[in-house]
Image (cartoon, rainbow, N blue to C red):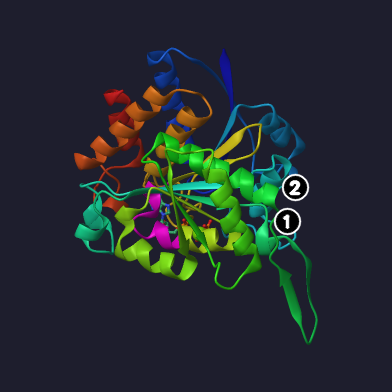
């Protein structure tokens, strides 16, 4: 079987970190004996420049027909038209592919703990995933309006929406340390009462996984005072947005963290959490780790290559351990030097 990948380099440092990652994917596919066919498409700002549209039809078609999508980054100061922004392309893909689950791992190893703004002893050996519901809640609920005197947003969730995101969290936990922390505001919000009851219900199908409930205000403190306690955190859209950003400070560099977005069926999208970093674009300085760890997630979840994924993750972290890193991690290597080192280790 040949896996089809659509690569969307995008803007800023996106093309630099995608290029080397695709070369690494080729090498890995040879070593682990699977076939990949890669299609690279215009997306984001560059697609606005070339086609007047951040998500051209041809790009979306390729995404729809793929097994997985690898995205570099989109956006930058060059695109200022509020009606035609590079980021609209991302919203378009999420909508078209119904990507309802956003997954963000936070990992701090012994060798990266000193980078964190938090105490090393607090963050060392942190390894958790936030599962954020992406298509419901306050961001989309109707009615939604504002006038001079009043503004209204509506927080709505159905049992079905909560159930499907709960399954994502429990299935991830089953493959990890078998612990789900569901985050809500059950003491005040009706939607959270339904959320909690539904999580309790879904948990019956996963007897090996422990379920805890935590209020979002408490969770925001626990995240930075005792992050090691978590395995899989699952929460609704707004809480997940805020907690993910809070969690992104734990590793100490934006360049380290991967993410994935899943739909019910169809391809998933994998991208590093950082943006297009226009300040260092084109300078061979970008840290490719977040992109490579996103590729590892893709290998594990979409390409059914768990050993290959583990191998890549091990190499990324051992390269960091050896001090072969870009400037953001305290090293003096270029993006291409890091890629070359990783290629040699495969
Ligand atoms: P966006 O709005 O697209 O999320 P942003 O303004 O939040 O973008 P980034 O583009 O992620 O920010 O960049 C924030 C800072 O982090 C910049 O100084 C950038 O150079 C740095 N940075 C981001 N990603 C990397 C990376 N992979 N390697 C090194 N530095 C990075
Ligand atoms: Mg940002």
* Front-most of residues 191 and 33: 191
Segment colored magenta: 245-257
Residue 235: name its quadrant.
bottom right
Neighbour tally class for label 2: few under 14, some 14-19, many 20 plus, Cα within 10 Å = few
Residue 288 position by quadrant: top left
- Observer-nearest residue: 209 or 70? 209
Indicate which label's residue lies in the foreground, 2 or 1. 1
Quadrant showing the C terminus: top left
Question: Farthest residue toward the bottom?
Answer: 149
Q: Are marks 2 and 1 in contact (CB under 8 Å)?
A: yes
Cα–Cα span, label 2 and label 1: 8 Å
Please indicate, yes or no, whether residue 97 appears anywhere in the rendered image. yes
Q: Residue 80, can we see it?
A: no
Q: Where is residue 180 in the image (x, y as percent from the top left)?
A: 44, 48
For the point 67% across and 64% down, which residue is it? Answer: 138
Residue that label 1 marks: 84
The N terminus is located in which quarter?
top right
């Amino acid at each position: 079987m040949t896996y089809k990948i659509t690569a969307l380099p995008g803007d800023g440092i996106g093309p630099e970190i995608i290029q080397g990652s695709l070369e690494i994917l080729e090498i890995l596919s040879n070593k682990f004996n699977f076939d990949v066919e890669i299609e690279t498409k215009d997306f984001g700002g560059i697609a606005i420049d070339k086609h007047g549209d951040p998500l051209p039809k041809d790009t979306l078609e390729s995404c729809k027909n793929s097994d997985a999508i690898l995205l570099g980054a989109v956006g930058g100061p060059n695109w200022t038209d509020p009606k035609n922004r590079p980021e609209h392309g991302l919203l378009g893909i999420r909508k078209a592919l119904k990507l309802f689950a956003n997954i963000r791992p936070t990992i701090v190893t012994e060798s990266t703990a000193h980078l964190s703004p938090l105490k090393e002893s607090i963050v060392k050996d942190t390894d958790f995933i936030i599962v954020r519901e992406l298509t419901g809640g306050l961001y989309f609920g109707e009615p939604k309006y504002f006038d001079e005197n009043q503004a209204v947003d509506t927080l709505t969730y159905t049992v079905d929406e909560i159930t499907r995101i709960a399954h994502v969290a429990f299935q991830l936990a089953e493959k990890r340390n078998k612990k789900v922390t569901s985050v809500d505001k059950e003491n005040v919000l009706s939607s959270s009462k339904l959320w909690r009851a539904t999580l309790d219900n879904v948990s019956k199908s996963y007897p090996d996984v422990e379920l805890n409930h935590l209020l979002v205000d408490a969770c925001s403190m626990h995240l930075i005072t005792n992050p090691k306690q978590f395995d899989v955190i699952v929460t609704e859209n707004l809480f997940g947005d805020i907690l993910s950003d809070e969690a992104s400070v734990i590793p100490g560099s934006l360049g380290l963290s991967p993410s994935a977005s899943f739909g019910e069926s169809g391809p998933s999208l994998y991208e590093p959490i950082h943006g297009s970093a226009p300040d260092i674009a084109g300078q061979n300085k970008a840290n490719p780790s977040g992109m490579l760890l996103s590729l590892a997630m893709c290998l594990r979840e979409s390409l059914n290559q768990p050993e290959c994924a583990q191998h890549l993750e091990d190499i990324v972290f051992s390269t960091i351990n050896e001090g072969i890193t870009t400037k953001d991690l305290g090293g003096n290597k270029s993006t291409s030097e890091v890629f070359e080192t990783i290629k040699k280790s495969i």
